[in-house]
Image (spheres, rainbow, N blue to C red):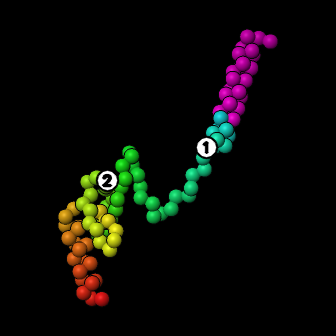
Amino acid sequence: MSFLGRMLRFLFWVVVIGWAVRLLGRAIGKAVAPKQAPRSTDQVPVTGGKRLVKDPACGVYMAEEVALPLEANGEVLHFCSEECRQKYGASLMTTAQSA
């Protein structure tokens, strides 16, 4: 067999063995990795290790550290600005008066 034939056979086996090792690694990785619980839509997104909270008035997500908290009805709500907090407080007052 010529030198070119040997080189092609060598490259073929390198590709086949590399593919098999990669496939085996994926199979083992999936078997060893812990099962993750399905993600529900009510979970709070997390980015860069910081917890994000959603402003109930305008729907903006922001880091919990920079949000303005307000305790209402036994739960803590977070707002992106003083205007949104006042707007939410005003809507609470109007719903309380109408009830």
Instruction: Residue lying at the far front in this picture: please name it.
Output: 74
Which residue is under mark 2?
Answer: 63
Image position of 12 with respect to 99: above or below: above
Which residue is under mark 1?
Answer: 33
Q: Residues within 10 Å of mark 1 (few under 14, many from 20)?
A: few
Q: How far across and how far down the image is residue 24, in percent?
A: 69, 35
Instruction: Residue lying at the far bottom in this picture: please name it.
Output: 99
Amino acid type, residue under disc 1 in the picture: Ala
Q: Residue at x 24, y 60 (%)?
A: 68
Query: Is residue 12 visible to the viewer in this orientation of the structure?
Result: no
Q: Residue at x 56, y 56 (%)?
A: 37
Of 12 and 28, nearer the camera is 28
Q: Is residue 89 left or right of residue 63?
A: left
Quadrant in the picture for the N terminus: top right
**In terms of image quadrants, where is residue 20?**
top right
Q: How far across and how far down the image is residue 59, in percent?
A: 33, 65
Q: Residue at x 26, y 78 (%)?
A: 92
Q: Is residue 84 left or right of residue 27?
A: left
Q: Main secondary structure of the magenta part?
A: helix
Q: Residue at x 24, y 87 (%)?
A: 97
Quadrant in the picture for the C terminus: bottom left
Q: Residues within 10 Å of mark 2 (few under 14, many from 20)?
A: some
Q: How far across and how far down the image is residue 63, in percent?
A: 31, 53
Q: Magenta part of the protein: which range? A: 1-24
Q: Secondary structure beneath disc 1?
A: loop
Of 49 and 18, nearer the camera is 49
Q: Which mark is residue 79?
A: none
Image position of 85 with respect to 37: above or below: below
83 drawn magenta: no
Amino acid type, residue under disc 2 in the picture: Ala
Query: Is residue 36 visible to the viewer in this orientation of the structure?
Result: yes
Of 36 and 74, nearer the camera is 74
